[in-house]
Image (tube, helix red, strand yellow):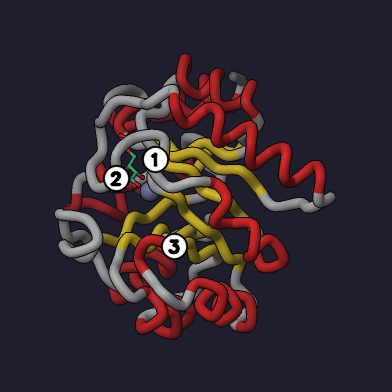
Amino acid sequence: MFISPSILNADYLNLESDIKQLENAGADAIHIDIMDGRFVEPTTWGATTVSAIRKITALPLEIHLMIDEPERSINEYVETGADVIMIHPESTVFLRKTLLAIKQANRKAGIALKLETRVDVILHCLDLLDVVLLLTCDEGFGGQPFHTMALNKISQVAKLREVHQLDYSIEVDGGIGLETGKLCKTAGADILVSGSYIFNQDKTKAIHSLKNI
Ligand code: DX5
Ligand code: ZN
């Protein structure tokens, strides 16, 4: 499994040290949750912080944009040097246009679906997707429970990939630990995002346990 630790539960005054620890612990990427206090309640970081993170790690950076009207911010996130930019269809009326802007900037484009969002929404964007990110908890906070209702959606997204002979990655985010990660892998997930499971214990052990799931 490809493991992308979320830094939502990191120590914000010591992000560099936490990211270096994740790198040394075998992380495959860093998952950065950008929250605007509107699309989701909390506010986290902006593009300036992502640019600062870009300078201290060579790991791929994936940006999970939980902001309203992401089309207004794509350019600034492209300029950070982030590798993957994921947007929510619930946050924009310019879904295809925004995904296209990400692709045209030579970044990987992802669509992120909240728990209650139907998989059908990706049907008219399949040609633009490098990643489908399925939230497996309610959005906005780390440390929330995993919902098994997401498993069926993982299978649906995997089936669509097979039927249409596509190669997007299927990534899951929220409440991922050993047991829930296994369930997601069985359902068809390739990438696990994990925050509190990794930050609440020895990071190397946690990441290795998830890799070998
Ligand atoms: C939730 C975020 C997640 C969150 C996951 O809205 O998208 O990335 O940080 O954290 P855990 O693994 O603690 O559920
Ligand atoms: Zn996330």
Q: In which quarter of the image is ligand 1?
A: top left
Query: Residue 1: in sight, yes or no?
Result: no
Which residue type carries mark 2? Glu
Q: In this figure, which residue is indicated by the disc labeled 3? A: 89
- Specify whether 51 is left or right of 62: left
Q: Position of residue 159 (x, y in %)?
A: 72, 38
Q: For numbered disc 3, what is the local secondary structure? A: helix
Mark positioned earlier in the residue sequence (1 or 3): 3
Q: Depth check: 99 or 202 in front? A: 99
Marks 1 and 2 close (CB-CB < 8 Å)? yes
Mark positioned earlier in the residue sequence (1 or 2): 1
Which residue is depicted at the point 81% across and 44% down?
163
Packing grade of label 1 (10 A; few <14, some 14-19, many >=20) is some
Q: For numbered disc 1, what is the local secondary structure? A: loop
The image quarter in which residue 97 lies: bottom right
Query: Residue 56: in sight, yes or no?
Result: yes
Q: Position of residue 197 (x, y in %)?
A: 34, 26
The image quarter in which residue 152 lies: top right
Which residue type carries mark 3? Pro
Above or below, 126 relative to 2: below
Mark 2 vs ligand 1: CB below 8 Å: yes
Which residue type carries mark 1? Leu
Q: Residue 139 carries which label?
A: 2
Packing grade of label 2 (10 A; few <14, some 14-19, many >=20) is some
Give the distance between the C-alpha atoms of the residues marked 3 and 2, in whole angstroms: 14 Å
Above or below, 130 relative to 180: below
Mark positioned earlier in the residue sequence (3 or 2): 3
- Specify whether 73 is left or right of 109: left
Q: In this figure, which residue is indicated by the disc labeled 1? A: 115
Which residue is depicted at the point 55% across and 19% down?
182
Q: Position of residue 166 (x, y in %)?
A: 79, 53
